[in-house]
Amino acid sequence: MKILQPAALCAPLATVVLSASLGALAPARTAIPPLSGQASGAPMTFALTSTDLKDGGFADRQVLNTFGCSGGNASPQLSWNSPPDGTKSFVLTMFDPDAPTGSGFWHWVVVNIPASTSGLPNGASKDATKLPVGALETRTDLGAPGYGGPCPPAGDKPHRYIFTLHALKVEKLDVDAQTSAALVGFNVHMQEIGQATLTARYGR
């Protein structure tokens, strides 16, 4: 019978004790907390905001100036951030799904907004000094290019006006100022890689 030597019996125990000692000497790892309001590893959200559309509504300056309304018909200020990777241009639309037409109502369409743009100032519509270079306003359901503010029928429930910023994978859409909103929409959805929305309401 082979008799184990005392040194052999002690070897495993010595290994365990040594490992524990080394572990105690190793520096503790401190977890790095995520940025406030953002989950660790989560991407920033593509968002559309406005300083003019306060509390989800329109000021008189943004309301249409016809069909019984007497607003300033100035397009609102809009800002956006964190577009999807690969964005090469934007298209902005304003749509009223509650209009009594059976198909809604397109109030504003702006195409070919450069990817470097992060917002539009108040009153940018029909003002070449405020619109980004290369941006193009196309025909709305009012029959001409440019912003048309809200003006629902008197006594109707407040309508929703949905601003949508579409991020596209192309630098330019092959449309012109007289292209209909529906045809622009067809082209947008063929090239879209993301969108951000903002809804305001107006009634009278």
Image (cartoon, rainbow, N blue to C red):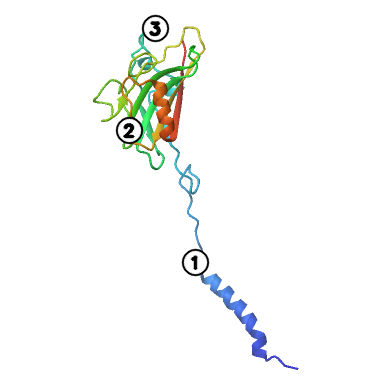
137 up-or-down from 142: above or below? below
In-front residue for pair 172/11: 172
Q: Distance between the residues labelled 3 and 1?
A: 73 Å
Q: Which residue in the protein does label 2 denote?
A: 172
Helix, strand or loop at label 2? It is loop
Residue drawn at x 26%, y 22% is 127
Helix, strand or loop at label 3? It is loop
Residue contact at pointers 3 and 1, CB within 8 angstroms:
no
Helix, strand or loop at label 1? It is loop
In this image, 140 relative to 100: left or right? Answer: left
* Amino acid type for the residue under numbered disc 2: Lys
Residue drawn at x 30%, y 26% is 136
Foreground: disc 3 or disc 1: 3
Location of residue 163 in the rendering, given as x and y in whole percent from the top left corner: 42, 25
Q: Residues within 10 Å of mark 2 (few under 14, many from 20)?
A: some
Q: How far apart are marks 2 and 3 (CA)?
A: 34 Å
Task: Give the numbered dot on residue 27.
Answer: 1
Q: Which residue in the protein does label 3 denote?
A: 67
Residue contact at pointers 2 and 1, CB within 8 angstroms:
no
* Amino acid type for the residue under numbered disc 1: Pro
Task: Give the numbered dot on residue 135.
Answer: none
90 up-or-down from 106: above or below? below
Location of residue 30 in the rendering, given as x and y in whole percent from the top left corner: 49, 58
Location of residue 87 in the rendering, given as x and y in whole percent from the top left corner: 37, 39
